[in-house]
Image (cartoon, rainbow, N blue to C red):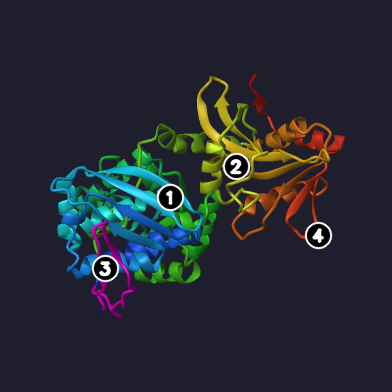
Amino acid sequence: MAEVFSQSEEGCIIDSIFEKPRTIKPLSAKWYINVFVENLIKKFRYYNSDEFVITISDMKNFVDLCDDRFLFLLGVLKDNGFTVIIDGDEKNVSIVNVSCRNETKEEDYNYVYKIQCLPSIIDLSAKTDIPVSAIIIMRIIAQTIIKQKILYKALVFDLDDTLWLGTLAEDGFEGIKNNMTSDKGAPYIAFMNFIKTLVKELGIYVAICSRNDMEIVSSAIDKIDETIFPLKKQIDYIVANFNDKSENLKEIAKQLSILPESMIFIDDNQMIRDEVKEQMPNVFVPEWLNHSDLTTLLIVGCFFERNELSLNSQERRKQYKLLQVERKNNNLPNLLIKAIEDKESCESLRLYAKTNQFIFSQHRNNFGENSQSLYFELYRTNGESLGICSAITYSNSFDGECVVLNWAISCRFFCIGLEEFVLLHMSRLCKSRKIKIAFNPTSENLKVNELLKKYPKMFRKNENDDFVEIDFSEDNIKNLEKETNIINMV
């Protein structure tokens, strides 16, 4: 392996692309780093191809650039568009200053990374053989990514010998209960407690995908005590049948209103893992032998790294469940909404960056001086905020035409009448003028295509397929009004 790097007074930068070993020992430092790169860095590249230069100050004295594990990390990061520069001669470090340069867009921003809970990082280092400084840098890269895009939103679990010990069809409910109250059940309970905390604090969805009879599974989960099945009250959706699990995962993604690649699927059965990997290569399917290794993998991979605790994130799952009940009852929820001027387009750009299923244009920033943005915040009738649900950016041309440069909706709020409300708001905003929306059809923005198909008399694509014209005829306005109960707040 070539280990070429240059040093200067300003810092250290890896200059070469390192040859990767053909085989990497499972559960070695390089194996864990590869999992991090393949399933976080490259997943990010699915949405963003920009080149980044990350300057990490204050850590130069804590990095061993003769350590091939560290060099391997920097090499694979550079291979994937993240050039890391290590700088600073400090002898004590608790706060790391990070400078991020987006070379593609020629944009710069800085942030501070706080080194906290060193004993837990040292413990992680001992389990993975990754140097402490390398783990910190992996987390800084993950922090840089999540400022652009939240990648993982759901955990999907098998049941038998994954969440509980035993096979429901063979052992029955009593057998499962006895297994989980024995010493052998302790690792399963500890793992579920870890997931439960992750879910409650970060708003991650939890789904079950089991090869079992649905009635038997539902009955078992209903009867089992939370002390031996801590995820009992955290499950957002259950699919239990004898179909291929890859097909069931597509159904789960649809029900959760997320893309399949936003899920991590965990199953103890190697054949099922292989089937899902083959049929759904964008879904992350971890390899694991025991729950301790699996927990370590989820932590060191930074798949649920966040830069803040968010009440909005913690409320997300509760909001989802309430809206799902109304959808199942075929009721449009009675909600209030507020349209807010977004002078710097900050909230709008944030939504454009993180949404995929409902976004009209892939051009997500720098709309020009004459553009204006609005974002929409949704409320229950009791005044409880459900968060920012949608955003539009638009401009008015000299010939009186209104051009919507982008329109996005958060995945939490599909099919509750929000699409119709925003369209009605556009009609009032632009009055009688012709309106068209910039449009880039992709394989991801399926919810946009669903809207276009729902109202074929309202939308018309132009010849180049890059704009959609909207016909706000009296009949179309009436159709929109029938499909929403959302009321504008004054």
Q: CA distance from mark 4 to mark 2?
A: 26 Å
Q: Which residue is mark 2?
A: 409
Q: What type is the residue that disc 1 sits on?
A: Ala
Q: Give the number of the disc on residue 6.
A: 3
Q: What type is the residue that disc 3 sits on?
A: Ser
**Residue 277 in picture, x, y percent from top left:** 44, 69
**Residue 32 in picture, x, y percent from top left:** 27, 64
Who comes first in sequence, dot 4 or dot 2? 2
Task: Classify residue 109 by image quadrant.
Answer: top left
Task: Classify residue 324 by image quadrant.
Answer: top right
Q: Give the number of the disc on residue 305.
A: none
Q: CA distance from mark 3 to mark 1?
A: 41 Å
**Residue 86 in picture, x, y percent from top left:** 26, 57
Question: What residue appears at the point 55 percent right and 25 percent down from the top-left corner?
Answer: 380
Proximity of marks 4 and 2: CB atoms separated by less than 8 Å: no
Question: What residue appears at the point 62 percent right and 48 percent down from the top-left corner?
Answer: 359
- The reply, left or right, for residue 392 in relation to residue 36 is right
Q: Please identify, in this view, whether the residue under mark 1 or under mark 4 is nearer the observer.
A: 4
Q: What type is the residue that disc 2 sits on?
A: Ile
Q: Which residue is mark 1?
A: 154
Magenta range is 2-25
Mark 3, other Cα within 10 Å: few <14 / some 14–19 / many ≥20: few
Mark 2, other Cα within 10 Å: few <14 / some 14–19 / many ≥20: many
Question: What residue appears at the point 37 percent right and 39 percent down from the top-left corner?
Answer: 233
* Above-or-below relation of 320 to 336: below
- The reply, left or right, for residue 462 in relation to residue 74 is right
| Extreme residue toward the right, this view | 474
Q: Which residue is mark 4?
A: 463
Q: CA distance from mark 1 to mark 2?
A: 19 Å
Q: Is residue 17 magenta?
A: yes
Examine the residues drawn in magenta and state their main secondary structure. Answer: loop
